[in-house]
Image (cartoon, rainbow, N blue to C red):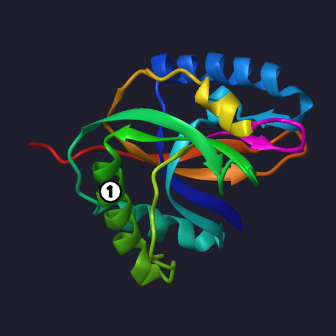
Amino acid sequence: MLRLFVGIPVPGECREALAGAVRALAEAAGEGLRPTRPENFHLTLQFLGETPDDRVAAVADALAAVVFSPFILRPGPVGCLPDCRRPRVIHAGAALGGEECAALAGRVRDATAPLGYPRGNQFTPHLTLARIKRPGGVDWRVLTAGFPAALPAFSVDRFVLWRSELTPAGPIYTPLRAYLPAAP
């Protein structure tokens, strides 16, 4: 069994800006925050979960049928999930490109539905920046409001089928196949 998900990778400049801001956030929050490792920044389009080895090729082939055009994504604003009163995750939404992300996620879900993956009914584009281990004693609303407002935008010129391996040191994401936009 392989634990799989489909997502948009975050490229260099944006990843570096997010990593620097998350380090500052972690310093302000103390030990109650577990930052996402910069190499793991991504925007999930669909979590597929545990998938039998013999079905991975079918998933990869189904995703090859997804047609999309490149678009610009700008992360932001930063907030908490489910909210800043009971936070579990610090995330960045999509200040620009959210509709395109939602459309791409819908196409990905349409492609995997015939293989038995649930289509789901709601998609909110976000990048997980950190997980909150101990929320007490921190005003998360104030802390996230201080997060940089102008995060770099980037071109979404691919999406990826990833394997997620859970380890005691945190997840390891291995790209299995990248999918490029349709040729003009």
**Taking 182 as reference, is 132 left or right?**
right
Tell me the crowding category of disc 1: few under 14, some 14 to 19, or many 20 or more residues within 10 angstroms, Cα based.
many
Q: Which residues are magenta?
A: 128-139
At x 24%, y 45%, the residue is 181
Question: Where does residue 75 sit, x and y in percent of width and height?
Answer: 45, 34
Asked if the stretch drawn in magenta spans residue 30, the answer is no
> Which quadrant is home to the C terminus?
top left
Name the residue located 64 percent from the left edge and 67 percent from the top edge: 49
**Residue located 70% across and 47% down the image:** 89
* Quadrant holding the N terminus: bottom right
Q: Which quadrant holds residue 135?
A: top right
Which residue is nearer to you in this view: 162 or 8?
8
Q: Residue furthest left?
A: 184
To which residue does mark 1 refer?
Answer: 104
Left or right: residue 48 versus residue 26 is: left
Identify which amino acid the numbered label 1 is placed on: Leu
Asked if 15 appears above or below 50 in the picture, the reply is above
User: Residue 86 location, x and y as percent?
Assistant: 76, 54
- The number of numbered badges drawn on the structure is 1
- The residue located at (31%, 65%) in the rendering is 107
Measuring from the top left, give residue 97's x and y in whole percent: 31, 42
The vertical placement of 4 against 70, above or below, is: below
Residue nearest the viewer, comparing 72 with 107: 72
Q: 148 and 54: which one is in front?
A: 148
Secondary structure beneath dot 1 equals helix
